[in-house]
Image (cartoon, rainbow, N blue to C red):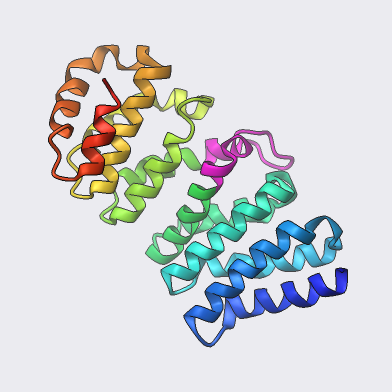
Amino acid sequence: MLEYAFNNGGCSVFELKQGKSLEVRQAAGLLLKNNLRATFSSLSSSYRQYIKSELLPCLGASDRTIRSTVGTVISVLVQLERVAGWPELLQALAQCLASNDFIHMEGAMDAIYKICEDIPEELDVDVPGLSERPINIFMPRLLQFFQSPHAVLRKLSLGSINQFIVVMPSALFMSMDQYLQGLFHLARDPSADVRKLVCSAFVQLIEVRPSFLESHLRNVIEFILQANKDPDDEVALEACEFW
């Protein structure tokens, strides 16, 4: 089984990085994800490290589909290994976010979004060797992306933060004013995906943290009323959840 996992997984990593066609690379990534779920516990520590080290450069893959596939594999690995078992990942993500290179920023944000979606609690833990929890490190940059000229970065950053509304880590609690200002800024976003996430944020806040909206309730209601008439059906439907 171990030899099969090594051969299958090793080929998957290689093809994901250097496959001759987009289809082959994407299929290799999905094969790697499934193979890791099935065999991870039986892999040697050196092989686990090999896979992780080979994945990180793929955050900057030129094709968005490959970056998305890499983000999926990374999220699965974090579920299996936990953040503390992959400190190099946090460093790589932070470097990508600070790079001001769109491809690397988008690759990192896609991975962060998937981690937040699957296991948000993993970013709000103490990690040996880090002076702050991962969410404390990432939160300022995520909030900055609300102003990004790239719709995908606005969407991924807002979607990531929204995953923490219910659990409310201190990083979000302390940044609530900036977060709410960002929501009102994004309420007029040209991207329907972003506007839908703004609606989702207000729906969650009014349900679990209504005190945060008390002083903004008039503006929130005005936005929701407008969103109820949004030309995009999904935005309008999400806004209806507020009531």
- Left or right: residue 32 versus residue 104 is right
Picture mark count: 0
The residue that appears at 19% across and 21% down in the rendered structure is 221
How far from the left and from the top, in percent, is residue 55? 63, 67
> Residue 51: x percent and y percent?
71, 67
Q: Quarter holding the C terminus?
A: top left
Q: Which residue is drawn at 34% across and 18% down?
A: 206
Task: Give coordinates of residue 100: x percent, y percent.
Answer: 39, 60
Assess whether residue 34 is covered by the magenta stretch. no
Residue drawn at 45 percent across, 24 percent down: 174
Query: Up-down: is 104 above or below 114?
Result: below
Q: Quadrant of residue 199?
A: top left
Q: Which residue is drawn at 14% across and 24% down?
A: 222
Q: Is residue 132 magenta?
A: yes
What stretch of residues is rendered in magenta?
115-137
**Residue 204 in view, yes or no:** yes
Q: Is residue 89 above or below residue 53?
A: above
Q: In this view, does 120 lie to the left or right of 65?
A: right
Q: In this view, does 103 lie to the left or right of 122?
A: left
Q: Nearer the viewer, residue 103 or 118?
A: 118
Q: Give how far across and how far down residue 21 sits, in percent.
A: 50, 85
